[in-house]
Amino acid sequence: SSFYHFCDMEYFCVFDLSFHSLQVLDVLFSTCSIVAMALYYCPINGDTYSALLLLSIGILVPLIANNPTSPYILGTTIGVSFLLLIALWIYHKRRTYCQCC
């Protein structure tokens, strides 16, 4: 994020990347951290975590690459994270219930 703001102030651009490129990277890393933290608290194993994280990144990258400042991006990120949490919570509860009975 600091690299993005340095370039925004025309102070220093890392690796001669454009302002738009740094903006896309900034938003991408921020949204990926939201999804990663949402998945971290889900009751899943490492392989499933990795697969869902890559799926979420695959959903978000095209949106962010086209227009990184769109408010739709934040809503999509939160929506994807919330749906993953709910779906995995239901899956975990169902699996736990079926083992008990």
Image: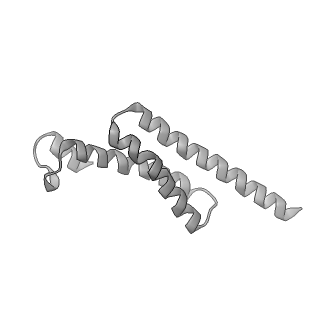
3 or 87, nearer to the observer: 87
Q: Quadrant of residue 15?
A: bottom left
Q: Looking at the picture, how far across and down is residue 45, in whole percent?
A: 60, 66
Q: In this view, does 93 lie to the left or right of 55?
A: right
**What residue occupies the far right of the structure in this picture?**
101
* Residue at x 34%, y 39% (from the top left corner): 66
Q: In this view, does 84 lie to the left or right of 16?
A: right
* Residue at x 30%, y 49% (from the top left corner): 25
* Residue at x 16%, y 54% (from the top left corner): 14
Q: How many labels does the image show?
A: 0
**What residue occupies the far bottom of the structure in this picture?**
46
Q: Quadrant of residue 97?
A: bottom right
Q: Which colour scheme is used?
A: one colour
Q: Looking at the picture, how far across and down is residue 91, in whole percent?
A: 71, 54
Q: Looking at the picture, how far across and down is residue 4, in whole percent?
A: 22, 46
Q: Is residue 68 visible in this depiction of the protein?
A: no
Image vertical order of residue 25 relative to residue 40, above or below: above
Q: Is residue 64 visible in this depiction of the protein?
A: yes
* Residue at x 75%, y 55% (from the top left corner): 93
Image vertical order of residue 17 relative to residue 71, above or below: below
Q: Quadrant of the C terminus?
A: bottom right
**What residue occupies the far top of the structure in this picture?**
71
Q: Looking at the picture, how far across and down is residue 60, in whole percent?
A: 43, 46
19 or 34, nearer to the observer: 19
